[in-house]
Image (cartoon, helix red, strand yellow):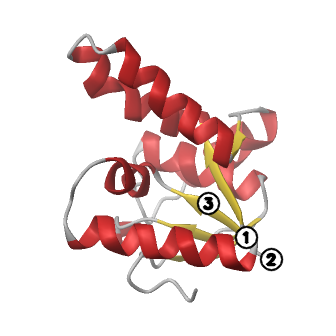
């Protein structure tokens, strides 16, 4: 069993039709269920997923997304440990990490995950204490 953090984009691919990306995420989730892996994400993911439905006035879809994530995932809060991780990430001089990416990575690091999955290739070569590996859906070793 592994602890696997999903960035927001994976949930978007799972909930909406993005062709091959959606199929990859669906296969990945099936593999995780077979392996009894833990799906982990953050409260930021829920917020990011609700932006478009909220903009469209679709409160029902907002609730549906939140319930789907809360019922299948461990949802990590941005707490004091994550805040410290966030500060470390944002203070890196050699690399500028956006605030939302830093929040996701900080939450994952504070949760001590084995794998952080994102299709944001700018994050793939980062080495962060508390996260063993960062990679894409296509390269996930599952």
Looking at the image, residue 49 lies above or below residue 72: above
Pinpoint residue 74: horizontal percent, then vertical percent: 72, 46
Q: Which structural element holds mark 2?
A: loop
Q: What residue do we see at 20% from left, 16% from top?
A: 56
In the picture, the disc for residue 1 is: 2
Residue 60, above or below 5: above
Q: Earlier in the sequence, mark 1 or mark 2?
A: 2
Whether tag 1 and tag 2 are in contact, CB under 8 A, the answer is yes
Of 7 and 95, which appears nearest the observer?
7
Q: Nearer the viewer, residue 7 or 39?
A: 39
Q: Is residue 70 above or below residue 37?
A: above
- Determine whether the residue tagged by mark 3 lies in a helix, strand or loop: strand
Q: Residues within 10 Å of mark 1 (few under 14, many from 20)?
A: some
Note whether residue 88 is visible: no
Q: Choose the circle earlier in sequence order: 1 or 3.
A: 3
Q: Position of residue 37 (x, y in %)?
A: 73, 70
Horizontal side of 64 relative to 20 (left or right) equals right
Is 68 in front, or is 93?
68
């Amino acid at each position: 069993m592994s602890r696997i953090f999903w960035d927001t984009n994976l949930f978007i691919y799972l909930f909406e039709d993005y062709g091959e990306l959606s199929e990859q995420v669906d296969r990945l989730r099936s593999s995780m269920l077979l392996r009894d892996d833990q799906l982990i994400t953050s409260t930021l993911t829920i917020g990011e997923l609700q932006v478009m439905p909220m903009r469209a006035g679709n409160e029902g879809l907002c609730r549906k997304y939140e319930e789907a994530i809360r019922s299948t995932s461990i949802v990590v809060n941005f707490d004091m440990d994550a805040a410290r991780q966030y500060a470390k990430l944002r203070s890196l001089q050699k690399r500028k990490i956006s605030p939302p990416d830093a929040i996701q990575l900080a939450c994952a690091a504070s949760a001590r995950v084995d794998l952080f999955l994102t299709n944001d290739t700018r994050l793939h070569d980062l080495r962060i204490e508390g996260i063993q590996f960062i990679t894409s859906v296509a390269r996930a070793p599952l």
